[in-house]
Image: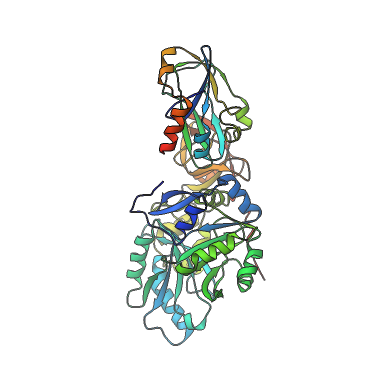
Amino acid sequence: MLFTKDHEWVALDGDVATVGITRFAAEQLGDVVYVELPEVGRRVARGEGFAVVESVKAASDVYAPLSGEVIAVNGALAGAPDTVNADAEGAGWFAKLRVSDPAEFEGLMDKPAYDALIAEG
Amino acid sequence: MTAPQTLLATPLTAAHRTSGARMVPFAGYEMPVQYAEGVLAEHRWTRAHAGLFDVSHMGPAWLRPIDPPDDAEAAHQAISAAIEPLVCGDIAGLAPSQLRYTLLLNETGGALDDLMVGRPAAPADQGSLYLVVNAGTKAADSARIAAAVQGVARLERADHDALIALQGPEAAAVMQGLCPGACALSFMRFGSFEADGQPLLISRSGYTGEDGFEILAPRAYAGTLWAKLVADQRVKPVGLGARDSLRLEAGLPLYGHDLDETTSPVEAGLAFAVSRRRRTRGDYPGAARIARELAEGAARVRIALLVEGAPAREGAEIVHDGQVVGRVTSGGFSPTLSQPIAVGFAPPALAAPGTRLSVVVRGRAQPAEAIALPFVPHRYARNP
């Protein structure tokens, strides 16, 4: 699993990336009450806002960690947005992207690097 | 995480930090937005048991008479005559121990603040008034009120002390163990009490729609009182996040969001706060506009919406028949109803429960339905 500085995670399987927000991000947001996911088929650019996660208090954008086409979204979050709090880096995944530029993988962090980032605060 | 030096601390700020609160800047203070369990759990706990809130950022204050008449009633009438020109409430008509919600209005009937005004019970305190104004407005309010009562009374701010709210269906049972005398108070009554040898000013009031109390305690005793209350298994600390969702469900307006200098009490659904005696006399600020709105209705009113889809936040457009008819002034997720709710302003014809509207969130119109306020019924204690 790889990470971005914007607190998204990416799990790669060939050219398909499953993405979500990190456990740290979910803790910082607090109780997630709504998740807005992109439409399947949408093409997103790395860094583009492609989902929105809402707590009781506020809405936060989620940025695409890689460029590509949305090929699946986690429909279960519509009825159970709290899955993001319960299992952010597993069942709380947001979307699957077919990655268009594998060179972008270079911009992602491994777990030690991400843990160091959040430890800095 | 360290806050900028410029933020003020309440008497309880250090206690919040050590109890795992997430601290945020709010109205110039460093305040707990939530504790470890989070907003939803804190909200639900308050509706089911008792929540404890540090609201020391608010503006409690006393008006103390400079040279009061010997007669208690005359003393109360003197201070009332000094402050009534600023507000729409009947202050002269307050009974001893009674607290009244009222509004500070400008000359065009717009709200400068909403506040509580109380007449103390003790004969020796007649001629004094207890006030609680909002955090963000307390400096301006204090100046305005002090100027209005000049020569008659002095304004003594009490916001150096701790103001703690205990709210929820088990609040009274908890209070029974701290200060049983306060349990005899009915909703919107207050009095002076003593617990642990400390003077406490306790009112039966709050900002959640639940039964509960607000306690003004000496700064040096605040930490002890807080610790004593949270040690009760029925009590959990609750942050500003849940305070906001609780008041939104209860349909209580938030100054600076649902009320501002353009908003009249009639528009805001607060006509009850324009007291009968004041209406008859027409002697309150903005009486011309407000009397007209009372007679003919206002062009816009505060409406309540059940929202489908994403929460509609402050600023979201309210749409009817393809036309933008108003904006959301407070919106979020209701933990009790498990769906988004919002309040905003729209023409009165659209306020009727059942009216189908939409709200625009991130460029998309989502269905919304007008309902009656409050979203969640009030459960105030009205002792005989």
Q: Position of residue B364 (x, y in %)?
A: 49, 29
Q: How is the image coloured?
A: rainbow
Describe residue B195's horizontal placement relative to residue A110 as left or right. Answer: right
Q: Is residue B255 left or right of residue B197?
A: left
Residue B118, given in percent of the width and then of the height, sits at: 49, 70
Foreground pick, B299 / B86: B86
Q: Can you say whether A71 is above or below B120 in the image? A: above
Q: Position of residue A65 (x, y in %)?
A: 45, 22
- In front of the other: B10 or B104: B10
Q: Do we see residue B325 in this rendering?
A: yes
For the residue pair B94 and B201, the one nearer the viewer reads as B201
Please state the horizontal and vertical placement of residue A82, each as a whole percent of the image: 60, 35
Residue at the (40%, 70%) spot, across then down: B83
Q: Residue A104 occupies which quadrant of the picture?
A: top left
Residue drawn where x is 33% and y is 53% of the image: B5
Image quadrant for the C terminus of chain B? bottom right
Q: How many marks?
A: 0
